[in-house]
Amino acid sequence: MNSSRDALIEQLWPRMMGFTRRMQAGMAGGLGPLAVLNLTVPQAMALFRLAERPRTIGELQEATGRSQAATSHGVAALEKKKLVARGTDPEDARRTVVQLTPRARGLLGQVEGLRVKTFEEVMAPVPTELLQRLDRAFTDLLQAMEPK
């Protein structure tokens, strides 16, 4: 083991946690449009995963880390709120696909707009040069973390 690398990672951890806390505190209002829907965290996670693309229950289960029963129950609750709809998979008629309704897409668009706005507000005091360095660092970090 590389002790200087381990020490650096240990030093980095509280800084990352401090950054995360500041971001979460500054952006807490970004989920406002979803709050009125009384969604559980797994239901909100499912909506954001479905915003990426329609999914089968099994794919949604895998993407959210929930059991099949919990995923099916969550989808049923989202259907009652008219946020998702089930349909037949065009590639395999035996499978059911879950997708967002236009209402859900509109709500998620509002949420994303608020999240971007609050992110801009949180980052406003950060100098441009530091933002550029942060952008390069995150780009490099994400590339280094890619599975090989």
Image (cartoon, helix red, strand yellow):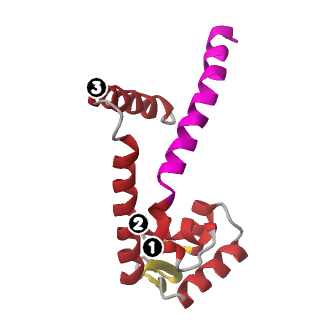
Q: Which residue is mark 2?
A: 111
Drawn side of residue 33 relative to residue 8, left or right: left
User: Could you tell which of marks 2 and 3 lies nearer the N-terminus?
Assistant: 2
Which residue sits furthest left? 128
Indicate whether 60 appears above or below 36: above
Of helix, strand and loop, which one carries label 1? helix
Of helix, strand and loop, which one carries label 3? helix
Out of 36 and 70, give the one closest to the viewer.
36
Is 2 contained in the magenta span?
A: yes
User: Could you tell which of marks 1 and 2 lies nearer the N-terminus?
Assistant: 1
Q: Which mark is residue 46?
A: none
Drawn side of residue 48 relative to residue 13, left or right: left
Residue at x-position 27% and y-position 31%? 128
Q: Magenta segment, which residues? A: 1-28
Q: Residues within 10 Å of mark 1 (few under 14, many from 20)?
A: some
Residue at x-position 48% and y-position 50%? 26
Q: Tell me where residue 65 sits by quadrant.
A: bottom right
Drawn side of residue 31 relative to residue 69, left or right: left
Q: Which residue is mark 3?
A: 129
Q: Residues within 10 Å of mark 2 (few under 14, many from 20)?
A: some
Q: Which residue is mark 1?
A: 33
Residue at x-position 54% and y-position 87%? 79
User: Could you tell which of marks 3 and 1 lies nearer the N-terminus?
Assistant: 1
Q: CA distance from mark 2 to mark 3?
A: 28 Å
Q: CA distance from mark 1 to mark 2?
A: 6 Å
Q: Contact, CB < 8 Å: mark 1 with mark 2? A: yes
Quarter of the image that includes the N terminus: top right
- Kindly identify the amino acid type of the residue bearing the numbered disc 3: Glu
Is 62 contained in the magenta span?
A: no
Where is residue 57? Give x, y as percent: 58, 74
